[in-house]
Amino acid sequence: MLIKNHWYAVEFGQQVGDRPLQVKVHGHDLVLWRSPNGTVNAQSDLCVHRGGSLAGGEVVGECVRCPYHGWRYDTEGACVEIPANRPGLPIPRKARIDTYPCVERYGFVWVFLGDLAAEQRPPLPELYGMELHTEARAEGFRAVQGEFTWQANYDRVLENAIDIAHTPFVHAGSFGNRDEPEIQDFDLEEIHDNGHLVSVSATVDLKPPLPSGIWRLIAKKERPPVNTSTGFYPPNVSLLIVRLPMGDMRLFTAAVPLDEHTTVSKFCMMRSFFTGGWADKDSHKRTLKIFREDQPTVEGQRPELLPFDLSAELHVKSDSIQLAYRRWRQEQLDKGLGLAAPTDEESRRAAAVIPSPARAAEPEMASAWVFPTVGSAAAGADA
């Protein structure tokens, strides 16, 4: 289930250049493109004429042009040109596509997937220590970005990222200590803004493993605990902070659901040590190593989809952060905000889109849309 009416980090800003870019989120295709002033736009990647992909087209001024018949759509989603029409012929009011609020910040492109008006939306997440900038910036830190693909549901991927107790076993030998797996009691820090849960985090001290190889001969026998924080920003970003003697590492990861069974983790790893560019390759390599260690376990979890019933799996105290995520998720589902991903058969037979704010803002224009929204009666009838 995709939880609508939230800000999703879906792509790195640096990936959106002068050509339209397709981004898949939970079985739905979006197109991202930059206006001449540098602003990123996010829209449904479906031309209403013949279902062409706008991502295969081009940016023309303040519009994106479909590659099939040249229809141009402006930043609000309205079609402003149908080249095949003779001059003066009016453009049908149905000639428009869904447009989603979009913000470029912290190195990510954030898209509001839902139909709430601006004053009703939850705030954009404020990532710990990050400057309010389009790029990933924090004083004294250097950032590297990358991605990793999982054959797993994004709920499972996100929960793994905020699971403290798996570290001594899944990451034993790298930074987990299997000989001292106990997790100390910790308190959850939950931050709310105007009734919206905006972040959950916790901090513990983890015992590092003993050095291996030649380092075992020269390192101190007693290594201090590593102060570690982890948490999440609803709906799809996780946080990991590791405070080492040489400095801090901060890992922000957006779990982007391509569909119910495939997730891409788009990560930003920041470090306050070895801040020269010469260390970027190693930082990127070490981050991918963490994901590869997690991969067999995450992809092997059953059931593949996160259970709706909290009692369907056994929980203990060290699972508090994951339980906070599951409670938040269930609250959203209870509000009717869950959107099911389209099946392959549904996608072949009919197109349905995630509802955009324009649909709710103009209910009298409900019939003036070509494609129905996900879960609507019209979508079900078409399928």
Image (cartoon, rainbow, N blue to C red):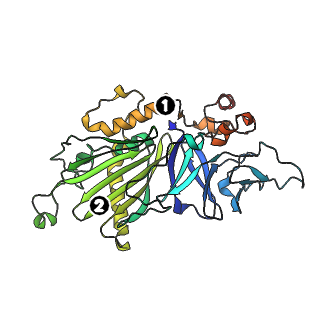
C-beta proximity under 8 Å, tags 2 and 1:
no
Report helix, strand or loop for mark 1. helix
Percent across and percent down for residue 338 are 52, 33
Mark-to-mark CA distance, 2 and 1:
36 Å
Number of numbered labels in the structure image: 2
Report helix, strand or loop for mark 2. strand
Residue at 48% in and 61% down: 133
Residue at 45% in and 49% down: 125
Q: Is residue 117 left or right of residue 79?
A: left
Question: 70 or 235, which is in the foreground?
Answer: 235
Q: Which mark is residue 133?
A: none
- Neighbor class of circle 2 (other Cα within 10 Å; few <14, some 14-19, many 20+) is some
Quadrant of res 5 = top right
Q: On the image, numbered disc 1 is attached to which residue?
A: 333
Q: Which circle's residue, 2 or 1, is located before the other in the chain?
A: 2
Percent across and percent down for residue 167 are 26, 47
Percent across and percent down for residue 96 are 73, 46
Amino acid type, label 2? Asp
Quadrant of res 341 = top right
Q: Is residue 74 above or below residue 4?
A: below
Percent across and percent down for residue 183 are 21, 42
Whether residue 227 is visible: yes
Quarter in which the C terminus is drawn: top right
- Neighbor class of circle 1 (other Cα within 10 Å; few <14, some 14-19, many 20+) is some
Q: On the image, numbered disc 2 is attached to which residue?
A: 248
Whether residue 27 is visible: no
Question: 174 or 118, which is in the foreground?
Answer: 118
Amino acid type, label 1? Leu
